[in-house]
């Protein structure tokens, strides 16, 4: 269904695993852009467009991650987001929890969006 991976048990682990796998080449693209000298503000914008929006897609379906997502995948997703900050792809450290509670657009404005 439109890029959402479901399994028989209706857990979203396979979907999030597929999203993280899809984000890997995007992270490499971010590295190439950074190495070419793209300024951090533009890297931040592109990171949110390519990676954060990919993670955010279908989040309302799996946003209650404590019951539908393994702690291991939450840690992996948060690790990817922390690495992005460490590599200079984003201006701030974000986490799955942050994405669930408030969405921020590429200019940094908080949108009225809460899944809790």
Image: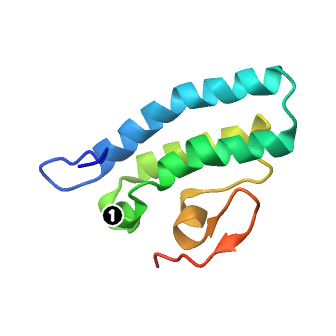
**Left or right: 91 in relation to 75:** right
Q: Position of residue 68 (x, y in %)?
A: 31, 61
Q: Position of residue 2 (x, y in %)?
A: 29, 48
Q: Position of residue 58 (x, y in %)?
A: 38, 57
Mark 1 crowd level (few <14, some 14–19, many ≥20, 10 Å Cα): few
Residue at image coords 32%, 45%: 15
Which of the 4 quarters of the picture holds residue 30? top right
Of residue 2 and residue 58, the one placed in the foreground of this image is: 2
**Left or right: 8 in relation to 75:** left
Of residue 77 and residue 27, the one placed in the foreground of this image is: 27
Q: Position of residue 79 (x, y in %)?
A: 59, 43
Of residue 49 and residue 75, the one placed in the foreground of this image is: 49
* Residue 15 to residue 93: above or below: above
Residue at image coords 52%, 77%: 114
Residue at image coords 15%, 53%: 9
Find numbered disc 1 in the image and state the secondary structure of the residue it sits on. helix
Using the rendered image of the protein, determine whether residue 11 is visible from the camera's viewpoint.
Answer: yes
* Residue 80 to residue 61: above or below: above
Residue at image coords 46%, 38%: 20
* Residue 108 to residue 3: above or below: below
Residue underneath mark 1: 61
* Residue 91 to residue 80: above or below: below
Using the rendered image of the protein, determine whether residue 79 is visible from the camera's viewpoint.
Answer: no
Of residue 2 and residue 6, the one placed in the foreground of this image is: 2
């Amino acid at each position: 269904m439109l890029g959402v991976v479901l399994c028989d048990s209706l857990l979203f682990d396979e979907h999030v695993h597929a999203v993280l796998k899809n984000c890997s080449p995007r992270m490499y693209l971010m590295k190439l852009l950074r190495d070419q000298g793209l300024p951090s503000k533009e890297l931040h914008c592109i990171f949110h467009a390519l990676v954060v929006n990919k993670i955010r897609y279908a989040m309302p379906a799996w946003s209650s991650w404590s019951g539908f997502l393994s702690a291991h995948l939450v840690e992996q997703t948060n690790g990817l987001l922390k690495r992005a900050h460490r590599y200079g792809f984003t201006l701030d450290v974000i986490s799955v929890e942050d994405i669930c509670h408030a969405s921020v657009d590429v200019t940094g404005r908080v949108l009225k969006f809460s899944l809790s």
